[in-house]
Image (tube, rainbow, N blue to C red):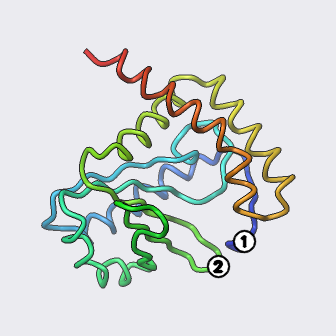
Amino acid sequence: MMNMNDIVVVPYEEGWARRFDEERWLIEEAVDGLQYRVHHIGSTSVEGLQAKPIIDILLEVADLKELDGRSCSFEAIGYECLGEFGMPGRRYYRKGGNSRTHQIHAFELGSADVQRHLAFRDYLRAHPVVAQEYGELKQRVAKACRHDITLYSEGKADFVKLHEQRALAWLKDTQP
């Protein structure tokens, strides 16, 4: 089992979509009664893309304060509730302790962060060459960063920022 401090990028696994679906049902029970949407995001949501084997989940809710009132429900399904965790306007939850398996990034419905995450995911799905480049970059950075998450994130940052901007422009151009 992988330790939370280990930064290992592995080949795409078919089971990631199933793991997301299984987790989505638990999350939907935890937020029952709220207005919400649940999305599979991150590299595990892009078929064929190398990734750290942690399922990234985007949860959109109408009101973050209402979501804050559901902390016990998230704890009951195995999540640590970490509040904004360094990003204003977000609620962050992680599951699996030192062997993290899932993480939830929650934002208000339709926020710019929601749009950015979904656009980047959809862009990578629609542009397999870019997805391949991203996977190869992540593999190189993971090997070079010596399990330092800050170095890993910094090593990908320019690529992600560039392609997030391209993704948002692409999304704008593809919408009627």
Residue in view at x 27 percent, y 75 percent? 68
Say which quarter of the image contains residue 106.
bottom left
Seen in the picture, residue 15 relative to 87 is either above or below; the reply is above
Residue in view at x 44 percent, y 70 percent? 93
Tell me the residue that label 2 is attached to. 98
Nearer the camera: disc 1 or disc 2: 1
Say which quarter of the image contains residue 71.
bottom left
Seen in the picture, residue 51 relative to 100 is either above or below; the reply is above
Q: CA distance from mark 1 to mark 2?
A: 8 Å
Q: Which residue appears farthest toward the left when viewing the image?
A: 33
Image coordinates of residue 50 in percent, x first then y, are 68, 43
Residue in view at x 57 percent, y 67 percent? 101
Looking at the rendered structure, the kind of residue marked 1 is: Asn
- Give the camera-side residue of 145 and 134: 145
Looking at the rendered structure, the kind of residue marked 2 is: Asn
Image coordinates of residue 70 in percent, x first then y, are 25, 77
Answer yes or no: do the residues labelled 1 and 2 have beta carbons within 8 Å?
A: yes
Seen in the picture, residue 169 relative to 149 is either above or below; the reply is above
Q: Secondary structure at mark 1?
A: loop
Tag 2: Cα neighbours inside 10 Å, few (<14), some, or many (≥20)? few
Tell me the residue that label 1 is attached to. 5
- Give the camera-side residue of 79 and 13: 79
Seen in the picture, residue 160 relative to 107 is either above or below; the reply is above
Image coordinates of residue 122 in percent, x first then y, are 45, 32
Of the two numbered discs 1 and 2 on the same chain, state the one appearing first in sequence.
Answer: 1
Tag 1: Cα neighbours inside 10 Å, few (<14), some, or many (≥20)? few
